[in-house]
Image: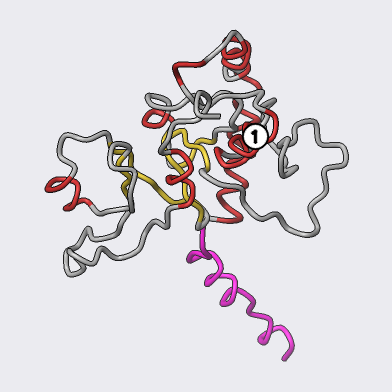
Amino acid sequence: MEMLVPPWLESLLSTTFFTVCPSHGDAPRSECNMFCLDCNSDAFCFYCRSTRHKDHSVIQIRRSSYHDVVRVAEIQKVLDITGVQTYVINSARVLFLNERPQPKSSTSKGVPHLCEICGRTLLDPFRFCSLGCKLVRIKNNGDATCNLSTKDEEEGEMREGRLPSKEEEELRERSQQEMNTSTLTPPHSNSRRRKGTPHRAPFGS
């Protein structure tokens, strides 16, 4: 498995992010949302990067629906993400680090694309919902890789799957907007207006 997985990947997936930095807790950007591939250690904040990891290979972790994500533009430079479902959130293409819990009511019946490990519904014909699920597959079967230096011909086929037609892309964007609306967006002023809109008392008099 050493040939298939970079030495820092498991540490990345098991690291806890978005805690307050013990060294810069009073600073405005003190959340630990960065990971150093060279040091392969704990998460750190913006200020720690400039002082302790200035010339290191660092990636920034972000959050979506309380789950850790990383931008594809960053991670694909150091990791083979072939087969992992990507999403567009806040105009940036990202992927999830780990498996996300699914509602008990969710069902895979009639769904064309499912994660090979956890069974989560996928928007496109990918194999995994997250880097974590891909790692599980590698450990169990060894028929995938996360190491850029060991890519095979499968990469070309999977990359073709990442270039959907315009219609498919529009459908995908709509699905993601629905996901974002239901999981990311809190109630706005519209809900407050609804509470005040019914004025039926005058008609009852």
Q: Position of residue 48 (x, y in %)?
A: 18, 52
Of residues 148 and 7, the one drawn nearer to the viewer in this rendering: 7
Reply yes or no: does residue 193 show up in magenta.
yes
Q: Quadrant of the N terminus?
A: top right
Q: Residue at x 66, y 23 (%)?
A: 143
Provide the residue designation for mark 1.
128
**Which residue range is magenta in the image?**
185-205
Q: Is residue 113 left or right of residue 167?
A: right
Query: What's the coloring here?
Result: secondary structure
Quick check: 42 above or below 164? Answer: below
Of residues 71 and 201, the one drawn nearer to the viewer in this rendering: 71
State the residue lying farthest toward the front.
2
Determine the secondary structure under disc 1: loop
Q: Quadrant of residue 183?
A: bottom right
Reply yes or no: does residue 68 show up in magenta.
no
Q: Residue at x 50, y 36 (%)?
A: 88
State the residue lying farthest toward the left.
51
Q: Position of residue 73 (x, y in %)?
A: 39, 28
Of residues 46 and 154, the one drawn nearer to the viewer in this rendering: 154
Few, some or many residues within 10 Å of mark 1 (<14, 14–19, 20+) = many
